[in-house]
Image (tube, helix red, strand yellow):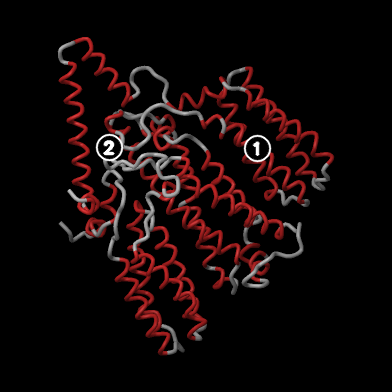
Amino acid sequence: MTDNERQDDPNREQDAMTTDARERHSRAGDGEQHDGSSDSQAENADDGQDGDDDGSMRPGEMMLTHPTKEVWPQYAIVSLGFWLIASTPTLGYESGLMRWNSIISGFFLITLAGLTIYRESGYANYANGFVGLWLLFSPIAFWAPTATAYANNSLVGIMVITFSILIVMRSEMEGPPVPPGWSYNPSTGAQRAPLIVLGVFGFFASWYMAAYQLGYIDAAWDPLYGSGTEQILTSNVSKAFPVSDAGLGAVAYAVEALMGFMGDRRRWRTMPWMVTFFGVVVIPLGFIQVLLVISQPILVGTWCTLCLLSAFGMLWMISLTVDEVVAMGQYLVRRMRQGDTLWTAFWMGGTISEDESGVDETSTRPIGDSPVSEPFWGVSIPWTLLAAMVIGVWLMLSPTLFGTTGLMADSSHLVGSLVVSFTVIATGEPARAVRFLNIPLAMWIIVAPWLFDGVPMIAAINAVVAGILVILLSVPRGPIADRYSGWERYATLETINRLNPLSS
């Protein structure tokens, strides 16, 4: 079979993987049939490896007990608690709420760390993680009047999360790292590196804008739109939030970057709960942020350079995150078919047998062999998607080029931004079906000029041509380089056939 045939027929690849696994099991059985006791032990070992029924500790239980075995991070948390208590009266917080919040939080940190050490309570350690999250959020909740109070609480909160969660969750788990039927591991450190980098950039960009909203600096720099950033940060849209919306974005980006460090390369099956929360923060909540940014020219009348860069980075974060979420979801379904409840599988995770790891020796990518390309496994940019992105940008610029105003201009800004957004997300191979969302947008692009008054004929023709091109470019799937245990079929037109009630 050629490489192109293997890429275009994921079901055949999956069948080959299943047959190969059965052959390996059969060979193992033939070699053990001469020894009844050995055969019985092998069966028990296989059952225990795949179902965690041999009495061994499951990943969730291991992570719960680990903080009580390695206690040095607790002493670091105690030190941070004392720092909060001692530094708050001397740093000029200028807010009673902020002072008492920091002092009480410091006492909580010390108490919970003590319970972890002396009462061997893993729950107390992870409760400190929530205290750290509160410290990260509290400056915007109380509108901290000084930059010192904001920075002190935020940095202490990040360090508390690091010591209470990141360090104890970096322990190496046992078992194969590659999901069954997959050609690569979506949870390696290299795979998460771009997410961490984009999260750190988004955090500092949002932190800077929050400093302007909270009054710590007098101006917000914008190299492209002049006072656009300041207009957006002081607009009625921003004022509608009960807290600083830029500060809220900084908290979200900080959580995303920190969660990028959590767990080892097997976290898609050892930490389903964490991958789920990470996916929720990045995918739906991240896309809401993108929608807020692309609506800025409609609601406020201008753009914001840092907002645009952060939103564009968030789109790529979504594209890079989908594969790990899919692998985790497939594993949860697998555990429930083996008898686990969703609750147990979600919080405790599990393992798989070595025979079921990956696709096969020739199709599974070796981890660490491609340090440059490995971060972007699972993402590809066919020329059709690249052309659709260009047309989306062209639509965003068309009001300026053709002199359209009013509703037609707003429509071009919004729809062009959405075309770019859906196309970027569709570069993630497990999310390739998202490109079909461009089709209804393209239909609107075609009809919109004829619904609004005062649209120049050249602008109407441009919209019709652009809409037709978007439809034509959104239908082809493009090449799929990797295997996803059958998930590939959802990236083809079969998805639309399944949604068609008239289809057999």
Q: Is residue 139 visible?
A: yes
Give the residue number, with chain letter if any, for mark 2.
361
Q: Secondary structure at mark 1?
A: helix
Relative depth, front residue between 390 and 48: 390
Q: Is residue 239 above or below residue 102?
A: below
Q: Is residue 235 visible?
A: no
Q: Which corner quadrant of the image does residue 273 belong to?
A: top left
Residue picked out by circle 1: 159
Q: Is residue 109 left or right of residue 367?
A: right
Earlier along the polypeptide chain: callout 1 or callout 2?
A: 1
Q: Give above or below for 361 relative to 38.
A: below
Q: Position of residue 468 (x, y in %)?
A: 32, 76
Q: Residue furthest front?
A: 369
Q: Give the alpha-carbon distance from disc 1 to disc 2, as whole Å.
A: 41 Å
Quarter of the image that includes the C terminus: bottom left
Left or right? Give the position of 289 relative to 174.
right
- Tell me the amino acid under the disc marked 1: Met
Residue drawn at (83%, 45%) of the image: 92
Q: Residue at x 48, y 42 (%)?
A: 277
Give the x, y percent position of residue 67: 56, 24
Q: Is residue 419 left or right of residue 469?
A: right
